[in-house]
Image: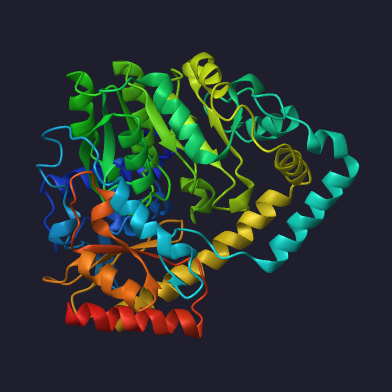
Amino acid sequence: MRDQHPLTRAPGALYEAIAERVLAQIRDGTFAPGEKLPSVREIAATFEVSVNTAVQSYRHLERLEVVDVRPRQGYFVRALAEDDEPSDDHSRAPVRISLSEHVLRLMEPHARKDMVRLGIALPAPRPGALRRFNRVLTDTARRLPMESWDYMHPDGHLPLRRQLAKRTLGFENPAGVDDTLITSGCMEALWLSLRAVSRPGDVIAVESPTYYGVLLMLGTNDRKVLEIATREDTGIDLDVLEQAMATRRIKACVVSGNAQNPLGFTMPEASKRRLAELAGRYDVPVIENDVWGGTVFDAAQRMPVKAFDAHGAVLYCSSFSKVLVPGGRVGWAMPGRYSRRFRELKRFSTIAAPSLMQLTLASWLQRNLHEEHLDVLRRDIRRQVEDMRRLILAAFPSGTRVRRPSGGCVLWVHLPRGVDGRRLTSDAQAAGVHVFPGEVFSAQGRYRDRIRINAGNPVSPEVREAVVALGQLAGGC
């Protein structure tokens, strides 16, 4: 068979392994920006694979926004903007966090009724899903009144844990029920994971930029932060991260392999596999925030880093908050070999997640309603994200750039030269529009020329008017 090439022994799908080879040569300058790449037939001949596999490889690189296809000409290296390259000074020195008050002030307008809420990352409620979920909740409360009223076991409702564990069947090392623990949202899962693997004063590596909630958590727990340069297409620089692991500069790292907030990238499978292997090799735990994992548009890319964890070194954290019921406050963790310590800490934090919500979610999963819901959610937010992206590019000044995310509902907006994201955010708030400045996604106040916009809502006349106003304000900054 033609596809029985040595690359088939490499981790991940064959087309991804070929794409990684091409990507490596693009990054090291073998293929320059704008240069034509080998034809599909040349790739097929070089790697002894079918033409279909070669086409898949190039389509994968297109999804990563690394190559462009030109009709009747072939595939070409996309010219990368300067800001897309990892900065060489991100990882020089750990720092302490000092942005909590600033972020809290920025979050306050979200609750105001007079604000157009484009700041907090959250998809709009789907009326059909809301009705269906409320029917399950009402039925659960009627059938199980005492169980809904009482405390749950700190580990969580067993049928819910069982349903979540079943969903790891495709992992290389599937999680068992005993490895699956219920938490009060994803943030508690992350917080307990951090405390399970580190102590005050320890250095924790993070992506740069990263979710401001992670930075607040690290600062509150008196950890230092080492920012690792992160590409907008493929994620954290694993070479730099490995060096930090190998030299014992860091105690742990916090990453998002899927639909990362704020950049929106999803790591290629080969990178996820390598990250899990590095965690095991250097005995440096990886805390994985996969709260947006269910929203990744491409089904082939949805596996988390945890799926490739052969050593129990990845502490997986997720929740139903972003994809189903924000007010439910139910998440879960799969802490691997740190389960015992995680359990001890859980008993001294919130003790147990809300009982009625756990019972309802177990029923929701048992009835196979969740995958149907996610299919509709992904379709809707993919359309909304693209509508919002087009609107931003039309409304904002020339030079604005917005990358297409691989999932989730946030857009990372690169403002034109000279436009200050903090000033724009402040002006927008005064005009009744809530967005987040890029600087809060960095422990060192980077990304002053960026803002993050939530695209989880349909582009209604109110949203359109708010974005147009933002664009006008950006033109005057």
Give how far across and how far down residue 22 sits, in percent.
Answer: 24, 47
**Colouring style:** rainbow
Tell me what residue is drawn at x 61 percent, y 64 percent. Answer: 125
Furthest toward the right, the residue is: 143
Q: Is residue 234 visible?
A: no
Front one among 104 and 367: 104
Lateral position of residue 190 relative to residue 43, left or right: right
Give how far across and how far down residue 363 sits, in percent.
Answer: 78, 42
Front one among 27 and 430: 430
Q: Is residue 193 visible?
A: yes
* Quadrant of the frame with the N terminus: top left
Q: Quadrant of residue 400?
A: bottom left
Tell me what residue is drawn at x 63 percent, y 19 percent. Answer: 178
Front one among 283 and 156: 156
Tell me what residue is drawn at x 44 percent, y 27 percent. Answer: 193
Lateral position of residue 55 relative to residue 84, left or right: right
* Quadrant of the frame with the C terminus: bottom left
Give how far across and how far down residue 440 sits, in percent.
Answer: 27, 52
